[in-house]
Structures are given as C-alpha cells and as structure tokens.
Image (cartoon, helix red, strand yellow):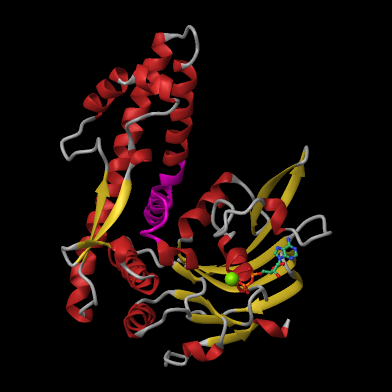
Amino acid sequence: MAKIKDIKFNNFRNFTDYNISFDKKLNIFFGKNGCGKTNILEGISLNAKGRGIRNSSLCNLIKKKESNFFIKNNLRINNNDFDIKIYAENINNKYKKIIKINDDFSKESINFLNQSISYIVFLPEMERLFQASPSYRRNFLDRLIYSSKKNYNRLINKYKKLLIERIKILQKTSFDNEWLNQVENEISFLGMEIYQSRYSELNSINKIINILNQDHKFKFKLKLQMKDDFFSNDLTSEKYLSVLQDTRNYDKNYGGTKIGPHRSDIIGIIDNDFDASLLSTGQQKTIVLMILLAQCYYLTNYKKINPILLFDEIGSHLDLNNRQILLDMINRFEIQFFLTGTEKNIFSFISTNAQFYNITDI
Ligand SMILES: Nc1ncnc2c1ncn2[C@@H]1O[C@H](COP(=O)(O)OP(=O)(O)O)[C@@H](O)[C@H]1O
Ligand SMILES: [Mg+2]
C-alpha cells in the first residue's frame, strides 16, 4: 500500500512554491489559523479520485491570480517509487483534474493508483456528526465503504443519476414504458447493493468496536443503525421494484423518489439508552474516533489495506478518552498519519517519534 514520501506545491492554495518531505509513520502540522494546514491535507488527498477532502471546485485550488496549480509527490507503493503529478486542465472554461503516474495517465495506471491508496479522514465538522444532516451521515458512511470498495463511488453516482432520470421520465407527458421499467429495474438492483453495503459496513463497525472494547473499555457503548422507512432485512430487488412501480404517481408529483438508500439515515445508540445526537461535540468526537479506529482495524486485518490517515484539527477536544483512541491508532497500525492542530504542545502526549512541521515557517 501507498506511503507518501514528499510533496511539492506550486501555486496551490496559499502556497507559491513549497516542498515538504514526510516521515513514513507520523507527521504533525501545527501553526496558527489560516497558515495552510488543511490545504496540505487537501493536497495529499488529491492523489485519490475526486476533488479532495474539501470537495472544492478545481478553480479554488489555484492560487489567486495564477493560472494553474501543480502538485508533485513521490509515493512508495509496495516497495516501488512512483512520481505523481496533479494539475488542472482548462477545456472550454471547465477545469478537469489531471493525474499522471510516472508521466502516464492511462486508465490502467489511474486504476492502479486508486487501488493502492485509501484515505481515512477526520474533519472538524465530524464533531457534530450526529447533529448534522442525514446526507452528511450517509456521505460519512459511504466514504468509509469506499476505503475498501473502490467501485462503490461509481455505484452511488450511477444510482443518483438513475433517480434523476426516472423523475424526468415520469414528469414527461408521454414516455416509453419500456425505458421506465428498465431504469426502475436498475435502480432496484443498485439500491439493494447500496443498502447491503451500508448494512454490512455498520455491522462490521459494531462488531469490531466490541472486539476493541476488550482492550479499551471505551467510555461509551455504541451501536450504529440504519434508519430507513423502507429497508428491511428481507427486502428483495423484486419487492423493491414493485414498490417503485406503485409509487410512480406520488413520486411524479413530489418530484423525487420516496424510497431508497438516498433517504436513509444512520443513527448511533449510546449505552443502549439514548441517541448520539445528545452527546457533546467532544463526546461525538470520541464516537467518530471509535468508528475510524474500527475502520482501520477492518482495513488492515480483513482487507490487507493500509490506509493513510488525514486528521484535520484533531488537536481540539483531546481529552483522555480521545487521546487513548488516537494513541491506539498510532501504536496498533503500520500506517502513515498526517495530523494537524494549532499548537505543537497539544501533541505532547504522543511518545512515538513524530515529525513536526511548523507551518508558520513558510
Ligand atoms: N486559491 C487560493 N489562493 C490563495 N490563497 C488561498 C486560496 N485558497 C485558500 N487560500 C488561503 O489559505 C488559507 C487557509 O488555509 P487552511 O489550510 O484552511 O488554513 P489552516 O492552517 O487554518 O488549516 C487562508 O489564508 C486562505 O486565504
Ligand atoms: Mg484548517
């Protein structure tokens, strides 16, 4: 699996020309607000498919008043070194992200890179995971699934496109019934696959948290559950399809599809008693760290995937519980970490050798 050896930014965000070499284990960026810590994590995250941890439009990545950004990194993947270049291409005023691996951008090379690199991300907004919108929670879960199932994003995107297409067909004055049947048929298959992926991801996190609890004695008992008016364990794609057909009229007027995984929510039940949304932000951070720890355990032990951890503003709310989980992640896994915080001394509890970077030095 991949480790990042170094990165070089040109005209990327606030960096004009900036080089940085990384430790293969633990890298900690500190510095005052606005110095570029999140930008560095974002730059690293662009090695994966998509628009990075901020899901930002490409034109915002380009340093103001400049015409393009350029990122070059050296990755070590299974004992081989690869040179990765990332920049934007402007075609008819639309930016497209270009990635080259050893100057090659063939489909095979891009696939190889995507298969070789998995990120586990913590963002400060996740401290409100259980107070955020259901779609935020779905995305959170989907990103975890994507870390081991690389075709999952394509599945989600295809499913979303089909939902839009179905409503467009329904709202036409006349339409081809055969076409609608085909779209609904596909929706029912993809929808089932998304339900099942999420269901098994939640189960595996719950199960692993129980295993880890033997070492940890976590502060909370956590049970993650899918909340969905339509899904049940005995749902089949045939039943799914027939409900889609029955709700055509409703969906046409409502302008959206009433049933399916795009309507699910994920809830956390704490100590078999209350909803995780009642926890404080620091306590929700504990829950999120428990989930991310479980996901790392799952990836390394069951999937032989060594993810790269990008933990932004991890320094806040680091009480004893949260420190204990973070330390366990650092000690337990052979993975590369990138952590950020405003002050160096927030991280003084970490005894492992760490490379510290004072970003105010730029
Ligand atoms: N396209 C851009 N061009 C120039 N500066 C940018 C661009 N995008 C963001 N910035 C600057 O980057 C800084 C934010 O960096 P960020 O990594 O979020 O800071 P932090 O260290 O607090 O995480 C801000 O000062 C912002 O003005
Ligand atoms: Mg930041």
The secondary structure making up most of the magenta span is helix
Q: Residue 234 at what x, y percent from top left? A: 15, 36
Q: Is residue 173 above or below residue 220?
A: above
Q: In the depicted view, which residue is nearer to us: 72 or 107?
A: 72
Q: Residue 116 at what x, y percent from top left? A: 47, 59
- Residue 260, by quadrant, is top left
- Write down the region rendered in magenta: 129-154
Q: In the depicted view, which residue is nearer to us: 18 or 209?
A: 209
Q: Residue 199 at what x, y percent from top left? A: 26, 48
Q: Verify whether residue 143 appears in magenta.
A: yes
Is residue 335 visible in the rendered structure shown here?
Answer: yes
Q: Quadrant of the C terminus?
A: bottom right
Q: Verify whether residue 171 appears in magenta.
A: no
Q: Quadrant of the N terminus?
A: bottom left
Q: In the depicted view, which residue is nearer to us: 250 or 135?
A: 250
Q: In the depicted view, which residue is nearer to us: 161 or 353?
A: 161
Name the residue: 32% across, 29% down. 188
Q: Residue 17 at what x, y percent from top left? A: 77, 72
Q: Is residue 80 above or below residue 133?
A: below
Side (left or right) of 113 relative to 191: right
